[in-house]
Amino acid sequence: MNKDIIMKNLEFRIPLIGSAISLFIGGLLLIGKVPSILTLGTMIIVVILVSLSFLITRYKNLIHVGGILGILAIISSATAPAHNEALLNFGKSLYITTLDLLMILGFYVFPIIYIYFWVFTIIRRKTIT
């Protein structure tokens, strides 16, 4: 594989892959604890994030899809009663704490990093044109 392709858009690809890994591990840990449809939905999102991380090297406009997904991730997690309840139980057990850390990484940290670079790219493009 060409080194230029691998290095292209890393500021977007790393947060996408980071979120995907966090969600994947969290989804695995929640198998049997949440409805199967939620686990399936999580795995579909993981596939979308990984696919997007490769597709943005070829189709630059898909960078905007990642930004929108990042915003939706933050909103969906912040408004999910189960996520809020889990955060209230942070530190009560290793299992819950691990899930909480994965949730914070997958739904907040990596999306915020992505959104930062996305907004910066939009501003830079507007000032150049």
Image (cartoon, rainbow, N blue to C red):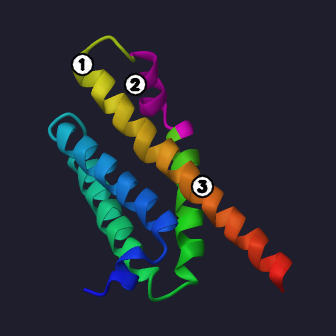
Helix, strand or loop under label 1: helix
Pick whichever, 86 or 14, lies toward us: 14
Q: Is residue 74 above or below residue 7?
A: above
Give, as a single range, the part of the protein colored magenta: 78-89
Provide the residue designation for mark 3: 71
Tell me if 51 is positioned left or right of 80 in this view: left
Camera-side mark, 1 or 2: 1
The main secondary structure of the magenta stretch is helix
Q: Residues within 10 Å of mark 3 (few under 14, many from 20)?
A: some
Side of 34 where 10 appears, left or right: right
Query: In the image, what residue occupies the spot 47% across and 45% down?
Result: 107
- Between 89 and 121, the one lying in front of the other is 121
Image quadrant in which the C terminus is located: bottom right
**Numbered mark located on residue 86 in the image:** 2
Q: Amino acid at mark 1?
A: Leu
Horizontal and vertical percent for residue 92?
32, 11
Mark 3 or 1, closer to the camera: 1
Q: Contact (CB < 8 A) between labels 1 and 2?
A: no
What residue occupies the far front of the structure in this picture?
A: 3
> Mark 1 vs mark 2: which is more N-terminal?
2
24 over 128 or under it: above or below: above
Q: Nearer the viewer, residue 118 or 43?
A: 118
Q: Report, in whole angstroms, how far the alpha carbon at label 3 lies from the one at label 1.
A: 29 Å
Label disc, if present, on residue 33 of the rendered structure:
none
Q: Is residue 86 magenta?
A: yes
Residue at the outermost left position: 32
- Percent position of residue 10, x then y: 46, 68
* Residue visible at 75% across and 79% down in the picture: 125
**Residue ID for mark 1:** 94
Q: CA distance from mark 1 to mark 2?
A: 12 Å
Mark before the other along the chain sequence, 3 or 2? 3
Q: Secondary structure at mark 2?
A: helix
